[in-house]
Amino acid sequence: MRVLIYVEGGGVGDHSMTTCRKGFLSFFERLLSGKNRVEVIPCGGRSDAFEDFKLEHESGKPGQYVILLVDSEGPLERDDIPSWDHLRARDN
């Protein structure tokens, strides 16, 4: 299985994007070691990360698992509310 992780952040420029990619890749490869091929895609801003994630997710490629990683920008008001609902209320 191929795992694509679209990440909010990474800064500006090749050096900071590379640093972000390497850091998250090191973290996720430990969690998914030997099971999956992991690719981290730093996207810069929040809306860019969501748009890139959405396009990849909608492509529906077999054998691919797509993840979006963004800041919550604050605590969840209630812990029984799904993350998507929190983000939808915050960002529409």
Image (cartoon, grey):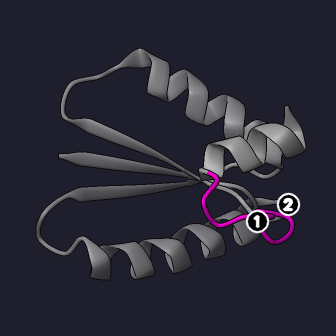
Residue type of the residue flagged with mark 1: Leu
Nearer to me, 42 or 66? 66
Residue 34 placement, left or right of 28: left
Which-is-in-front pick, marks 2 and 1? 1
Nearer to me, 1 or 77? 77
Residue sitting at x 46%, y 27%: 57
Crowdedness near tag 1: few (<14), some (14–19) or many (≥20) residues, C-alpha within 10 Å:
some
Residue type of the residue flagged with mark 2: Val
Residue 76's tag is 1
Q: Position of residue 92 (x, y in %)?
A: 85, 31
Q: Position of residue 88 (x, y in %)?
A: 77, 37
Residue 20 placement, left or right of 62: right
Nearer to me, 47 or 43? 47
Q: Position of residue 80 (x, y in %)?
A: 60, 60
Residue 69 placement, left or right of 34: right
Element carrying mark 1: loop
Q: Which residues are magenta?
A: 72-81
Residue sitting at x 38%, y 73%: 28
Quarter holding residue 11? bottom right
**Image position of 43 with respect to 10: above or below:** above
- The span from disc 2 to disc 1 (Cα, nearest Å) is 29 Å
Residue 12's tag is 2
Reading the chain from its start, which is encountered first: label 2 or label 1? 2
Residue sitting at x 19%, y 58%: 36
